[in-house]
Image (cartoon, rainbow, N blue to C red):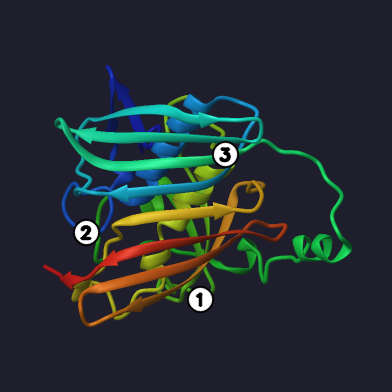
Amino acid sequence: MPDALFVPEGDAYLPTDATLGPWGPQLLHGGPVSALCTTLMEDEGGDGFSTVRFSGDFVRPLAQQPLTFSSRVVREGRRLQLVEGELDAAGKLVARCSLLRLRPLPIELPADAVAAALAPPPDLPEHFHRDPGNPSFPGTFFLGTGIELHTREPGGFRDGEGWFRLLLPVLPGRDEPSPMTRAVAAADFGNGISGFGEWPATIAFPNGDLVVHLARPVEGEWVRLASTSTWTADGIGLATGRLWDRRGQVGVSQQSLVLSPAG
């Protein structure tokens, strides 16, 4: 069992087997990559801000090889901070991402806004069944090793709903992921849990991007994702998700899907 999703190696980060996804040998899942980029950009931005949006574009296949990351604060004002980052592999850009962060300012809300914010989730992870993984993919993967999934029905990975919990830190010694790190790790499963057909898939549907907006920070370990997918005959798709924690809805997610024959 790896100790973390990524291990620092000089100036780079080496993906462990707990970051692997379903789309090919030694290809990474977008969830841990998004979690790494979020972690490093939040380090760059520092304290005092709450991350409200993650945006990532995965411009090349994410392979299991050393990754280097660079980031910068593009703008910082009294209430708003924008951080951008680039992830490279073998000298080539593989992902470009950004965080929008806001400085909290306590205000008094109208009663109906308070009531909406307190609406509970429709269920809890204890009401669902732990997903054992898919026998079509033997070995170590992000799902089951790096992140835990509970589904409404046993073996119901494609039901469009699930509760997710990170099992490993993003980096060694970083045992408490940030709220946005937890959110992006779960949200990147939107296309997987709402896809069509059975595994192994006859159509591949990896996401070319991931965008997550949070209305407030995720509280606790668990993130609930409910997602729907739209596929079109021209090979383009969209997965749209809603995110909850144990207290209520926290945000939304979207993924642009690249459809092609699997194999």
Q: Is residue 109 above or below residue 13?
A: below
In the drawing, does residue 263 fall left or right of residue 214?
A: left
The percent coordinates of residue 164 (x first, y second) are 51, 56
State how far apart marks 3 and 1 are (Cα): 37 Å
Decide which of tag 1 and tag 2 comes sooner along the chain.
2
Q: Which residue is mark 2?
A: 23
Q: Is residue 102 above or below residue 245?
A: above
Instruction: Identify which residue, 240 or 174, lies in the foreground.
Output: 240
Residue 5: numbered disc: none
Q: Which residue is mark 3?
A: 101
Instruction: Identify which residue, 87 or 175, lies in the foreground.
Output: 87
Q: Which residue is mark 1?
A: 153
Between label 1 and label 2, give the one nearer the viewer: 2
Residue projecting furthest to the top: 10
Residue density around tag 1, few if under 14, some if 14–19, many if 20 or more, within 10 Å: some
Q: Is residue 184 above or below residue 86?
A: below
Between label 3 and label 1, give the one nearer the viewer: 3
Amino acid carrying mark 1 in the image: Glu
Can residue 21 be seen in this snapshot? yes
Please name the residue shown 57% across and 39% down the image.
101
Residue density around tag 3, few if under 14, some if 14–19, many if 20 or more, within 10 Å: many
State how far apart marks 3 and 2 are (Cα): 32 Å
The percent coordinates of residue 209 (x first, y second) are 34, 55
The percent coordinates of residue 83 (x first, y second) are 46, 34
The percent coordinates of residue 111 (x first, y second) are 88, 63
- Displayed quadrant of residue 178: top right
